[in-house]
Image: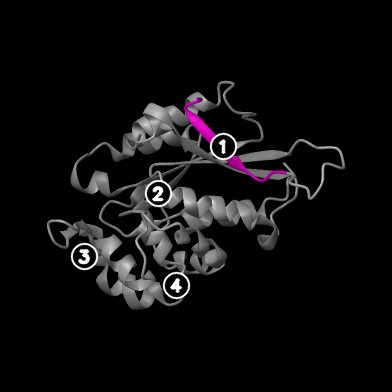
Amino acid sequence: MAPIRTYSNWNNRSSNAGEQIEPYRHYYFICEGKNTEKWYFEKFIDIRKSLSIHSEIDISYLEKTEEHENLSSPKELIKFADEQKNGKIPFDPKFDKMIVVFDADIFENQQNNYEEIIELGKKRNILGVTNPSFELFLLLHFEGAVDEIILPDSENIIKNEWVGTANNRRRYIEDIFRKKAKMRPKSNMAIGELANHVLTAISQEKKLNNNIELCKGIVTSNIGIIIQSIIDDQCND
C-alpha cells in the first residue's frame, strides 16, 4: 500500500459518458491530525459545487497511511508533503498548491523554532495554522462563537491546559468544542457536517488573528482564508 491515500471527487459523473478532462489546478490538503481534519476536508470536497468552486479545480485530501499515519511533527509533515510532489501525486509547481495544516500549540508548550518551521514550509507550500488547535477553527462554524466563547476566554484557550478526569483527559479547547457541538471531534464522523457552515467560519475568522507568522501567545486561525482563496480562484493565472 502507498504511504498516502487520496480523496477527491474531481470530475465525478452520474455515468461514464463524456470525456474526462484534466483539472487546471490541484489543491492538496495534508494535515497533522488523522480523523478530525480528514472528516472535515472530505466533506468540504463533497460540497464544492454548493460553494461555486470553479469546475476546473481539483481538491484532494491526502490521508497518511502505514508508518506515516501518526506523523504529526510540523517539520516532518512539511518534509512528507514535499516528498509527495516527486511523482507520487500529479503536481505542477507552476499551477498546483500543497496546503499543510497543523496546530501551533506545540510551539507554545514545547518548541521554540516556530519561525524556522514557517520559513521552511512557506517556500513550497501554503501553511494552514491554528493556535491552539483545529478545534478552534471548528468552533468558528457556530454563529457568535468568537464574541460569545473565544474572545472572552482567549487566555485559557491559548494556554490550552489539560482538563477532565484521569480516564477522560482532553485539552481545554477540545472541552469547549465538545460542550458547544455536543460531539467528540476525534471520534465522531459528524464533524464533517460542519463544513456545510464554512462560510460562517470564514466570516468569523476575520475577527481573530490570521497572521501565522505572529501567532505566539495569540488565538490564531487562517484556515478560512485559505478556503476562501480556493472559492475565489477563477483559474486565470
Which residue reaches farthest right?
Answer: 18
State the quadrant of the C terminus.
top right
| Residue 176 percent coordinates (x, y) | 29, 68
Q: Identify residue type, mark 4.
A: Phe
The residue at 59%/28% (across/down) is: 89
| Residue 108 percent coordinates (x, y) | 23, 48
Q: Identify residue type, mark 2.
A: Val
Which residue reaches farthest top?
Answer: 86
The residue at 73%/39% (across/down) is: 23
Vertical position of residue 207 compared to residue 237: above or below: below
Front tag of 1 and 3: 1
Circles 2, 3 touching at the beta carbon (< 8 Å): no
Magenta span of residues: 1-10
Per the rendering, the mark at residue 6 is 1
In the displayed structure image, the side of residue 187 where residue 90 appears, left or right: right
Q: Identify residue type, mark 1.
A: Thr
Of residue 65 and residue 15, the one placed in the foreground of this image is: 15
Circle 4 packing at 10 Å, graded few (<14), some (14-19), many (20+), is some
Query: CA–CA distance between discs 2 and 3?
Result: 19 Å
| Residue 6 in magenta stretch | yes
Secondary element at image label 4: loop
The residue at 16%/63% (across/down) is: 164
Per the rendering, the mark at residue 142 is 4
Secondary element at image label 2: strand
Circle 2 packing at 10 Å, graded few (<14), some (14-19), many (20+), is many
